[in-house]
Amino acid sequence: MLKNYSKYYTEFERPPFAPTFFPTEEEFADPIAYVAKIKPEAEKYGVVKVKPPPSFRPPFAIDSEKFGFTPRIQKLNQIDGLTRARLIFDAQLASYWHMQGHRFEVPNIDNKYVNFYDLYKAVMESGGVDTINAQKRWGYITKKIGFKQQRANKIKTLYFRWIDAFQKLFTQDEDDEENTSDGCSSTTSDSEIGQVECGGHIPQPRTKSMAGLRFHTKEKKTRTSDPMDEVVCKKCGKGDDEDYLLLCEDCDYALHTYCCSPALSNVPRCSLFYL
């Protein structure tokens, strides 16, 4: 032991234990007054223990024998501002394949589930599936969503098996609405949508409701395939700054952190519920 520190051990004196107070029912009839009464003595220790009489029942006390609540399951991998957009996408994708008569299951590669929303976003942000095929960038996409590049062929197969037909139908619905609003008719056939690169024909639903897709207003001519584009701040009416956009867990209510009252300096790490 260094000599410079030895004195802290040899000359150490244990501080006295903090006292415990046992007020009577009469003394504790007014808890605030009792705390003020023992303040001069309690200040000597910094912390004290007060054990109220057995009859003391504060108005906000909870009956531990009768109180019960249902715990809410919060998945740690879904605590972020884009959770609702991911859930919307997953629900629409699952509904689409359910209407096709196929059982939708999330695949597992190397003991890790494939996040179809992250895969879809990575493909769209990289220029779309045609660009990725032309530039042979499936290895980059595979690495971007957290898998080894050796799994590129598997990821590509999963994309064309589960996402490509859904994405084409989603885009085709927007094209039909744009052409209808301009007084034109669509010339794209169902067979063009139903064919996927892996081969095989997938039957298409007759209406949007069968595919589990939302109806879009005819005035909306901007081509978007990201569910997050439908979420806007209820105060400023803008959907930008997604990293600062807070989404309610129970509804589609959204607010920017700087639009809250008072404004928040950062995104909370807990679940959000707007009243």
Image (cartoon, rainbow, N blue to C red):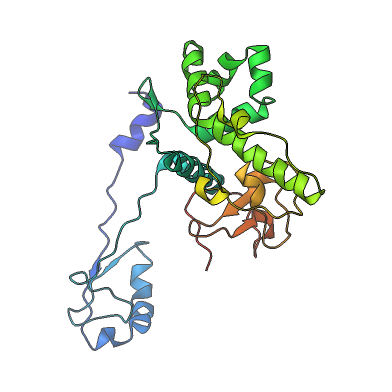
Q: Is residue 100 above or below residue 245?
A: above
x and y percent of residue 134 in the render? Answer: 68, 13
| Residue at image coords 69%, 41% | 224
| Residue at image coords 56%, 48% | 207
Residue 173 vs residue 274, the one in the foreground: 173
Residue 50 vs residue 77, the one in the foreground: 77
Residue 132 vs residue 182, the one in the foreground: 182
| Residue at image coords 37%, 19% | 110
Q: Is residue 11 visible?
A: yes
| Residue at image coords 23%, 76% | 52
Q: Quadrant of residue 168?
A: top right
x and y percent of residue 73 in the render? Answer: 35, 50
User: Total marks drawn?
Assistant: 0
Q: Is residue 243 above or below residue 199?
A: below
Q: Residue furthest right?
A: 182
Residue 9 left/right relative to 154:
left
Q: Is residue 221 visible?
A: no
Residue 37 vs residue 221, the one in the foreground: 221
Q: Quadrant of residue 234?
A: bottom right
Q: Dividing the image into 4 quarters, which one contains the N terminus? A: top left
x and y percent of residue 42 in the render? Answer: 34, 69
x and y percent of residue 191 in the render? Answer: 59, 30
